[in-house]
Amino acid sequence: MRIKGGYYITETQKTIARVHRIDESLLEGMWNQHLNREIAKNGLVLACHWESGEDQLASMIGMPELYSLLDGGGFSIDMRFNLQDSTEPFAIIDTTGVNGAGILIE
């Protein structure tokens, strides 16, 4: 709900009620993401660009250290690409190890 120029959410748990103000830039950024063509720079860890035919690029870029999810950290992956002649699936990002743990985006 929007009250006096701010956005708030509420929560209740039996006899406890809470109100939280939400950062306007977060919500407005989400609502306008379809218009935003800028590369995210806040907290950027890795940026790369590769052209068709550079099949070895993924193996040349090391996976950056990410914030621990166990410690309350998080991360997001922001990608934009145009596939024109892809007839077979291929890995865009693959950090999986022998135990299968990691990130795989095909």
Image (cartoon, helix red, strand yellow):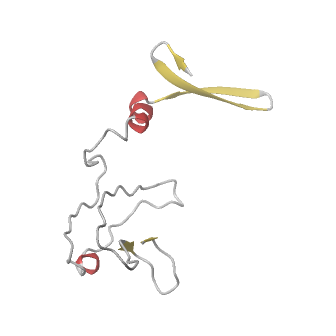
Question: Which quarter of the rendering shows the C terminus?
Answer: bottom left
Decide: is 81 above or below 34. below
Q: Is residue 82 left or right of residue 23?
A: left
Name the residue rendered at 79%, 28% in the picture.
Answer: 15
Question: Residue 44 placed where, x, y %?
Answer: 28, 53
Q: Is residue 48 left or right of residue 64?
A: left
- Residue most extreme to the top: 4
Decide: is 83 above or below 24. below
Decide: is 30 above or below 3. below
Name the residue rendered at 38%, 31% in the picture.
Answer: 25
Question: Which quarter of the rendering shows the N terminus?
Answer: top right
Return the residue nearer the eye: 69 or 56. Answer: 56
Question: Residue 72 placed where, x, y %?
Answer: 52, 53
- Say which quarter of the image contains residue 54: bottom left
- Say which quarter of the image contains residue 92: bottom left
Question: Residue 9 placed where, x, y %?
Answer: 59, 28
Name the residue rendered at 52%, 84% in the picture.
Answer: 99
Question: Residue 89 placed where, x, y %?
Answer: 40, 77
Name the residue rendered at 47%, 61% in the picture.
Answer: 68
- Callout count: 0
- Residue most extreme to the right: 14
Q: Is residue 59 left or right of residue 103?
A: left
Decide: is 30 above or below 95. above
